[in-house]
Amino acid sequence: MTAPFPVYQHSPRPVRGRVPAIRRLASLGPISSEAERALMRAATASRALAAPRELTREGRPVSGTFLILAGWAARVRLLEDGRRQIMSVLLPGDLIGHCHQPRPMAVSTVVALSEISYCAAPQPIGLPDLDRVYAISHALEEAHLLAHITRLGRLSAGERMLDLFLELRDRLSICGLVEEGSMAFPLTQEMLADAMGLTPVHVNRTLQLLRRHGDIALGNGRLTLFAPEALALRVGHRVAQVTGHGAEC
Amino acid sequence: MTAPFPVYQHSPRPVRGRVPAIRRLASLGPISSEAERALMRAATASRALAAPRELTREGRPVSGTFLILAGWAARVRLLEDGRRQIMSVLLPGDLIGHCHQPRPMAVSTVVALSEISYCAAPQPIGLPDLDRVYAISHALEEAHLLAHITRLGRLSAGERMLDLFLELRDRLSICGLVEEGSMAFPLTQEMLADAMGLTPVHVNRTLQLLRRHGDIALGNGRLTLFAPEALALRVGHRVAQVTGHGAEC
DNA sequence: CGATGCTTTGAACTTGCTCAACCCTTGTGG
DNA sequence: CCACAAGGGTTGAGCAAGTTCAAAGCATCG
C-alpha cells in the first residue's frame, strides 16, 4: 500500500521499468543503470496536482523540466473569447519544458486533465543516455504534433477520434498501461472536443456512432478499442516511432 | 547579374544579413563572423529545386540538414486517398532536418511550393553560436506547429487565413522580405487549402470576403495586409518569438 | 436531498463541401 | 499568328458535416 502507483501493485514482480514513466523512457533507448537510478530517485520526490490545475503558464518563467509519472496532462492554448485548443496530450513518461537551451519562458500552458503525479526530470549532465533519451522523447513529441495537425486538417470527426485513440493506445502500451486493448481514459467529452477541434455535442454523437459500429467501448473512465489493427488501417493511422539507430527529426 | 538572389540586387549596399536566410538566422541570436562566414560559404553551393518537387521523403534516409535560401517549401503529409495536409510552411532561413541526434530518417516529406534555392546547412561543430541559433530556430518551428494546431482546431476559415497570413508576414519581415506590408506570395489557392484544412473552393470564397472587407489584397503572386495590427487584434494572433535570453521551449 | 459535473437528446441553423461548369492567362506547337 | 492545352481562379446550386441553444437524464457526493 506504500507504492506510489496503486494501479501497478498487482504486477507480479518488480521488473525493470515497472514504473510507467521510466518504462517509457527506457523504451526510447538503452539507459545505464546509473541513469535509471537517477530517474527512480527523482520519482521519489513526486508532487501531485489535481484536475484542472495548471503546471506551467505560457510566457511565465519555468523552474525546470518536469516528468509526468502518472495521470494525463495537456498543452493547451486559450483564446480571448474562451475557445480552447488542446495541442497535445501528455502521458506518463512525457517531459514538460525540455530543451537544450537556457529557457526562461514556457511556450505553452500545461494543465492537468486528471489528477497527476509528476517530478522534476533529472538533469542529464554526465548521463549521456538520459540526454539522448530526452532528445528522442522531444522528437517523438514533435511527431505527435505533426500527426495532430493532419488529424485536425484532413480527417472527419470519426476518423479524428479513432486516430487519436490509436495514438494514445500506442503511447500508453509503451508504458504498460494497456491491458487487452483496454485502457484507463480520464478525458471527458468536453476535453476530447477541445483536443479534436469539435463541439462537445458533436463528440458525443460521434462517439455513439463509433460505439454502435462496434469500434470502441468508452465509459466509466475506460476506453477499449476493438480490432485496433483494422481501425488503424481504416483511418490510415501511422505509428510515430523512433527509427533505426537514432531519433527521427 | 551573378548574385544568387536577384530580388535583392537593388539593395543599396551589401549590409550584414543582406541574404534573407542569413538575416533570419542572425536575428535569432548573435553569431560570430566566423559562423556567418560559414553560412555564406555554404550558401555559395546552392542548389535549385522546381515547384512540386520533393526535397526529402518521409521515412527515407536523409543526407544532412538543409537551409532554405530562397523560395517557399512545406512539410506535407499525404493520405492514402489523396488528401494532403501542409503541416508547416518553410521560408528562407528555415532549416530542414535539423536535430541533435544521429538521424537516419526524415520525419516528414518536404516539397518545394515555389522554385526554391537551398544549400547544406553548415555543421555547427566548433561554432557554438550556430548551434544555439539552430536550436532557437527549431524551438520557433515548434511554436509554429502549435500555432497551426490552434488555427486548424479553433479558428473559422476567415480567421485561419488571416492568422496564417500574419504569421507569414512576421516571418518574412525578419528576412527583410516585406515591403510596406506587401510580400511575394507564391501559394496557389489549392496549396492554401491544403495548409488550412479547407477545400480550394472555400478558400476562394473566403479570400473574396477578406478582399471585399478591405483586409487584404492578393493576386499576381503578391499579398498585402492592410492594417495588420488591427487584423492581429481581431483574430487574436500572437507572434511567436524568442523571449529574453534564450530559446523558448 | 439537492448540488454538481458529465452525458445525452432534439430541432434549427451555419459553415464548409461537392460537383460541375466556366473564365482567364500563359505558354506551346502548328 | 492562331489554336489549343494547361493551370489557376471564379461561380452556382445542392448537400453534408458540424454547430448552437436549450433541456433533460444520470450518476456521484456531501
Image (cartoon, coloured by chain):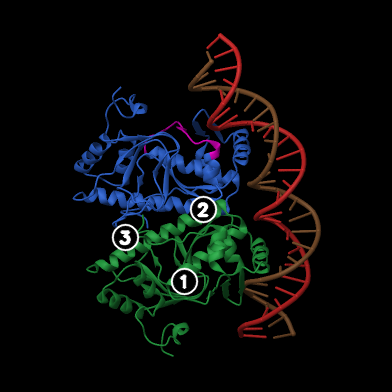
Chain colours: A green, B blue, C brown, D red
Q: In terms of depth relative to the viewer, which is nearer, D5 or B145?
A: D5
Q: Earlier in the sequence, mark 1 or mark 2?
A: 2
- As helix, strand or loop, the secondary structure at mark 3 comes to loop
The residue wearing badge 2 is A150
Q: What are the residue bounds of the magenta stretch?
A: B175-190
Subunit that carries the residue with mark 3:
A
Q: Residues within 10 Å of mark 3 (few under 14, many from 20)?
A: some
Give me the residue at 33% from left, 61% from top: A135
Q: Kindly tell me whether residue A166 is visible in this rendering.
A: yes
Location of residue B76 in the rendering, given as x and y in whole percent from the top left corner: 46, 47
> How far is the residue under mark 3 from the one under mark 2?
24 Å
Q: Residues within 10 Å of mark 1 (few under 14, many from 20)?
A: many
The residue wearing badge 3 is A246
Subunit that carries the residue with mark 2:
A
Indicate yes or no whether the magenta region holds residue B198: no
Location of residue B233 in the rendering, given as x and y in whole percent from the top left corner: 53, 45
The quarter of the displayed image where residue A205 is located? bottom right
The residue wearing badge 1 is A172
